Amino acid sequence: MTDTQETGGTGGTGGTGELDGVLAGVGPRLRRIRRQRGATLTALAAATGISVSTLSRLESGGRKPSLELLLPIARAHQVPLDELVGAPPVGDPRVRAEPIERDGRTMLPLTRQPGGLQAYKMIVPVGPDEPDPRTHEGYEWLYVLSGRLRLVLADHDLVLGPGEAAEFDTRLPHWFGATDRGPVEVLSLFGPQGERMHVRAKPRQG
């Protein structure tokens, strides 16, 4: 193979510069995602088998990212690898949607229509805040993906684990957050007043 083939021809330097720009953004992105999940470097090191010093250098830009390092981090955070490296956007926001930050919580929209039923994946970090139940128009369905979710609903104070769900009229005073055991990932469906999240289909008449 010639030197020109190895470098990608005369345009190789431009590609290298673009790659350097992508790699430079990995460190801050790793730190942001870790903090969104309420994880410490020590906890991430235990989950990935990567030393705290290496993780710290990755986040500060002192260590060049590699697949060997990024793959276990992506698995620990339960995010696609392209979210860690900052893959370019695609046309469908359901494929690569921009996360929404609200009250310290990360919300990833899963639907694209402006009205009607809305779906989100939410990451709720551990917080010192006390329950502050509120009311508004609508109907909500929550499904816990990981972690433990505390749900205060009117006079009820519940803790839901992975695989458990709750649905309620949001005109009832309600609040939910992570327990002190760690962050929680939740699938949230929210619809207009009177709409239900599931329908039991009747069998077709013979």
Image: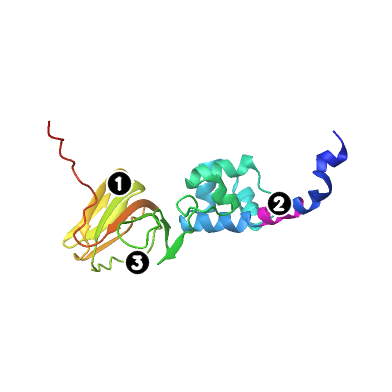
Q: Residues within 10 Å of mark 2 (few under 14, many from 20)?
A: few
Residue 205 position (above or below residue 146): above
In this rendering, the label closer to the viewer, 3 or 2: 2
**In magenta segment, residue 18:** yes
One can see residue 50 in this view: no
| Residue receiving disc 3 | 129
Q: Position of residue 66 (x, y in %)?
A: 66, 44
**In magenta segment, residue 188:** no
Q: Amino acid at mark 2?
A: Leu
Q: Is residue 132 left or right of residue 120?
A: left
Mark 1 and mark 2: span between their CA atoms? 41 Å
The mark nearer the N terminus, 1 or 3, is: 3
The mark nearer the N terminus, 3 or 2, is: 2
Query: Split into 4 quadrants, where in the image is the C terminus?
Result: top left
Q: Amino acid at mark 3?
A: Asp
- Residue drawn at the location 69% of the way across and 57% of the way down: 21
Q: Residues within 10 Å of mark 3 (few under 14, many from 20)?
A: few
Q: For the magenta stretch, what is the residue range?
A: 16-24
> In front here: 42 or 59?
59
Residue reaching furthest front?
206
- Secondary structure beneath disc 3? loop
- Residue drawn at the location 61% of the way across and 43% of the way down: 69
Q: Is residue 3 left or right of residue 114?
A: right
> In front here: 135 or 112?
112
